[in-house]
Image (cartoon, rainbow, N blue to C red):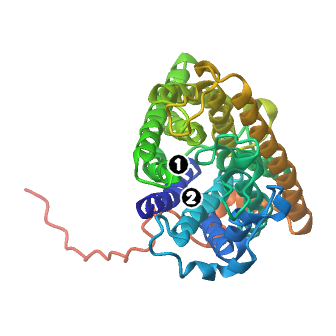
């Protein structure tokens, strides 16, 4: 669990580089700042009260929100049982990073045009009102002393590592904020091209690496279950990357590095809820479907007119829905979750449970996020001034990602030379 937590933390710079390479050269600093800023805000919230609401005893036993009044500030975790397999403090920091990364994912949808200070305030409110309740629904399992969330314990939908609580939640939230925020200046007629595709590929690789801790650590052990989960995670990412570039080629285009990187992430998103529910062939199937479907979905923003800058909706929302629902078809009792889906004789019951979880998270997150974003827009405004957006939003930080002109280098003074006589 210590190793898995370290891997998940590595996903923070991975996400920053993945997103940073996809924006313009005068916008990369802001993208990195939005990623790290969201993580910092949510980590602080998690210590003060986030963990207590997400994993505390369900208020009234309804499975909607937890409450642990004895543990605000997490001081009660200092004297954990040294014999415990997983110390409570370790589980707390592991889940802290889940909360932080989920919130940071939304930044990709609003890139290039949202006020940085407002973004930090928004992340605090969103994590409190949206993420914490959903995390309780999905991740808080009941014990002899604690009643957990309704999705995990009442309908018993399968979400091994966060298809609903993380990816669907962040994806639909990004759509809600984008609808309030509006389109980038000139979009879609003015191109907004990635400025550094190798940077994006590096970010995708770091995310893939860190995802082994994200999914594997959710096994809460280093046994066979974690090994199966890691195997499925690697397989799905590989299959989705190939499916995405195959879709590009079939559509008559080139097989791109951006498509390959995006496809890998789409497969990782889709396998996140299903990594403990399917066999390796099932993981490949999920990867192929997610890679092709997400490649198709990212273009829908042009048809429907919402400016999702870095395709959070097309990758995380669509990928999360696909992975969560396909559990209802491809789950096998031989996998760690131990339940059969429709294709293995399990009937429609599991599929109905998965669909219920998807619909609940979609509805709750979209409505509440839209209200939060709208209130921020009315009170303080969400967008930077138009001139800042045109100039490049990095200017608000008084920094640039690249000093291409060597402005910081010492001036070179050439020595005066005596002209040599011309040759005879």
Residue at 54 percent across and 57 percent down: it is 16
Q: Which residue position holds label 1?
A: 195
| Image-based side of 140 in relation to 281, left or right | right
Residue at 82 percent across and 48 percent down: it is 366
Residue 88 in percent (x, y) is at 55, 70
| Image-based side of 1 in relation to 383, left or right | left
Is residue 256 at all visible to an observer of this figure? no
Quarter of the figure that contains the N terminus: bottom left
Frontmost residue, 285 versus 124: 285
Residue at 41 percent across and 61 percent down: it is 3
**Residue 342 location, quadrant:** top right
Residue 258 in percent (x, y) is at 51, 38
Mark 1 element type: loop
Is residue 147 at all visible to an observer of this figure? yes
Q: Which residue position holds label 2?
A: 28
Frontmost residue, 419 versus 326: 326
Mark 2 element type: helix
How crowded pointer 2 is (Cα within 10 Å; few <14, some 14-19, many 20+) is rated as many
Q: Are marks 2 and 1 in contact (CB under 8 Å)?
A: yes
Report the residue that reaches farthest toward the front: 144
């Amino acid at each position: 669990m210590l190793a898995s937590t370290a891997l998940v933390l590595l996903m923070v710079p991975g996400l920053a580089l993945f997103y940073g390479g996809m924006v313009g050269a005068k916008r990369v600093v802001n993208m990195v700042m939005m990623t790290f800023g969201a993580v910092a805000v949510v980590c602080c919230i998690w210590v003060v009260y986030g963990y207590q609401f997400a994993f505390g005893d369900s208020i009234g036993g309804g499975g909607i929100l937890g409450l642990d009044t004895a543990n605000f500030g997490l001081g009660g975790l200092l004297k954990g049982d040294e014999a415990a397999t997983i110390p409570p403090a370790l589980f707390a920091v592991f889940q802290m990073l889940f909360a932080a990364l989920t919130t940071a994912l939304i930044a990709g949808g609003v890139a290039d045009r949202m006020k940085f200070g407002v973004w930090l305030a928004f992340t605090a409110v969103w994590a409190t009102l949206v993420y914490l309740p959903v995390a309780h629904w999905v991740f808080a399992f009941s014990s002899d002393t604690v009643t957990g969330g309704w999705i995990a314990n009442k309908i018993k939908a399968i979400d091994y590592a966060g298809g609903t609580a993380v990816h669907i939640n962040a994806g639909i939230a990004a759509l809600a904020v984008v609808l309030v925020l509006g389109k980038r200046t000139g979009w879609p007629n003015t191109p907004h091209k990635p400025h550094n595709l190798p940077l994006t590929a590096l970010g995708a690789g770091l995310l893939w690496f860190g995802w082994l801790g994200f999914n594997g650590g959710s096994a809460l052990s280093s046994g066979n279950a974690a090994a199966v989960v890691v195997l499925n995670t690697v397989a799905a990412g590989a299959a989705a990357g190939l499916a995405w570039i195959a879709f590009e080629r079939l559509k008559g285009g080139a097989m791109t590095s951006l498509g390959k990187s995006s496809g890998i992430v789409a497969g990782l998103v889709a396998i996140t809820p299903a990594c403990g529910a399917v066999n390796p062939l099932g993981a490949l199937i999920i990867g192929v479907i997610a890679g092709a479907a997400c490649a198709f979905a990212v273009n829908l923003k042009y048809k429907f007119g919402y400016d999702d800058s870095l395709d959070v909706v097309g990758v995380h929302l669509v990928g999360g829905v696909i992975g969560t629902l396909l559990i209802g078809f491809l789950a096998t009792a031989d996998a760690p979750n131990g339940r059969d889906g429709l294709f293995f004789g399990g009937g429609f019951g599991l599929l109905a449970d998965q669909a219920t979880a998807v619909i609940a998270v979609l509805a709750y997150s979209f409505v509440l996020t839209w209200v939060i974003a709208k209130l921020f827009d009315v009170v303080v405004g969400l967008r930077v001034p138009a001139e800042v957006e045109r100039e490049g939003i990095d200017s608000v930080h008084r920094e640039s990602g690249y000093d291409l002109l060597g402005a910081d280098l010492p001036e070179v003074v050439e020595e005066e030379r005596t002209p040599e006589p011309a040759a005879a």
